[in-house]
Amino acid sequence: MRTLFALTLFTILPALAQTPGDHSRVPPARVPSPYLSAADAQAGLNQLDPKLIASYTGGAVQVGKGLNATVRRRARGPQYAITHPREIEYMVITKGSATLVTGGTLIPPTIDSDPYPNADPNALIRSAKGVQGGLARKVGPGDVIVNLPGTAHWFSEIDGEIEYAEIRVPNVDPAPGIEPFAVSPKK
């Protein structure tokens, strides 16, 4: 028993003897994190074509190449309702206010290159008519919204303009028992 204790002690002591803050096992440095300053975001948004900002999708400035992160500006007028079947979308409102409807179902017909039903589980499903049901909330600066996979969402009304940071996390399956997305039946 003493031999086992001594072997254990001699095995553990060198590991305990490492100096605090020893980072010899930290992975090597990677490239610096992508960064978009508030000034650069505003400058980019201000350079967007006003017609694009007033369109169904609004205009956006990328945070970094190949990232699912943008700063977006939208203006009053018709808006797409959308669901991302396999993406979580985070929205942080930075300026302006709007009524955001989340949940419910998209109102047909769906549009774009990804109509419903669609065999592609990553398809974006959009409707120009909006969302039926769901919960309408007034959103403004500082509000954070998390649209889970398959959650329909839609700015039903924008008070002038709204700006927000949008971050999407791809390849996320809906929770067990949750349909990947929903579209109201055609009437």
Image (cartoon, helix red, strand yellow):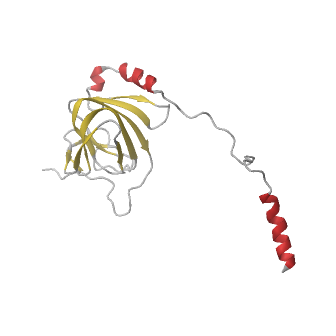
Which residue appears at 38% of the width and 59% of the height? 175
Tell which residue pokes out farthest to the left in this image.
187
Count of numbered circles on the image? 0
Examine the rendering and report whether any part of residue 127 can be seen: no
Left or right, residue 104 beside residue 61: left
> Residue 103's spot in the image, x, y percent?
26, 51
Examine the rendering and report whether any part of residue 182 can be seen: yes
Which residue appears at 18% of the width and 53% of the height? 185
Camera-side residue: 147 or 38? 38
Which residue appears at 26% of the width and 26% of the height? 54
Q: Quadrant of the N terminus?
A: bottom right
Picture quadrant of residue 167: top left
Camera-side residue: 31 or 127? 31
> Residue 36's spot in the image, x, y percent?
48, 28
> Residue 86's spot in the image, x, y percent?
39, 50
Q: Is residue 28 placed above or below 183 in the rendered structure?
A: above
Tell which residue pokes out farthest to the bottom in this image.
1
> Residue 91's spot in the image, x, y percent?
37, 40
Left or right, residue 45 beside residue 65: left
Q: Is residue 67 placed above or below 119 in the rendered structure?
A: above
Which residue appears at 44% of the width and 36% of the height? 69
